[in-house]
């Protein structure tokens, strides 16, 4: 059974939650939610191609796509791999204080970071949605 539509649906829900978190001032959660959203959208794309993908690295998930799928996404999103790198860099420090030199993640992430993450995630999720249509 192909569950790609379910994964894409959850990717959109995660992106909506990231926006809610950003508006509430929880920028570290907004950034993490953006990563989760793109991770689930990429999983949806893999599943639609009858592939499995494991792990949390967005760049690796993208590189594991067949060349035709990765080329299609690359044409739809400018600077796609850089956007994935930005979001990948948010995966650990937005959740774990010991990944930072001091303080908690909530002390280190602000509106500019969450706005940036939301912009990148929206572009990526939209491109994956279009590729699945």
Image (cartoon, rainbow, N blue to C red):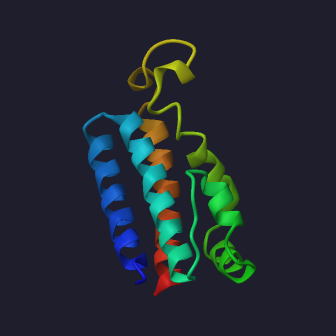
The x, y position of residue 123, in whole percent, is 51, 65
Q: Is residue 95 left or right of residue 49?
A: left
The x, y position of residue 13, in whole percent, is 30, 61
Q: Residue at x 47, y 71 (%)?
A: 126
Which residue is at the far bottom? 133
The x, y position of residue 52, in whole percent, is 56, 70
Relative to 53, residue 5 above or below: below
Q: Is residue 24 visible?
A: yes
The x, y position of residue 79, in whole percent, is 68, 61
Relative to 92, residue 43 above or below: below
Relative to 113, residue 117 above or below: below
Q: Is residue 51 left or right of residue 116?
A: right
Which residue is at the far right? 67
Q: Residue at x 65, y 49 (%)?
A: 85
Q: Residue at x 44, y 25 (%)?
A: 105
Numbered label tally: 0
Q: Along the line of sight, which residue is nearer the eye, 75 or 8?
A: 8
Location of the N terminus by quadrant is: bottom left
């Amino acid at each position: 059974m192909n569950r790609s539509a379910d994964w894409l649906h959850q990717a959109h829900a995660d992106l909506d939650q990231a926006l809610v978190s950003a508006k509430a001032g929880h920028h570290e959660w907004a950034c993490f939610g953006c990563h989760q959203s793109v991770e689930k959208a990429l999983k949806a794309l893999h599943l639609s191609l009858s592939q499995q993908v494991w792990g949390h690295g967005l760049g690796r998930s993208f590189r594991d796509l067949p060349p035709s799928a990765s080329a299609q996404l690359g044409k739809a999103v400018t600077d796609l791999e850089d956007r994935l790198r930005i979001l990948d860099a948010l995966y650990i420090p937005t959740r774990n204080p010991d990944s930072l030199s001091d303080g908690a993640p909530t002390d280190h992430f602000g509106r500019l970071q969450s706005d940036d993450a939301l912009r990148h995630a929206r572009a990526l999720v939209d491109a994956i949605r279009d590729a699945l249509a």
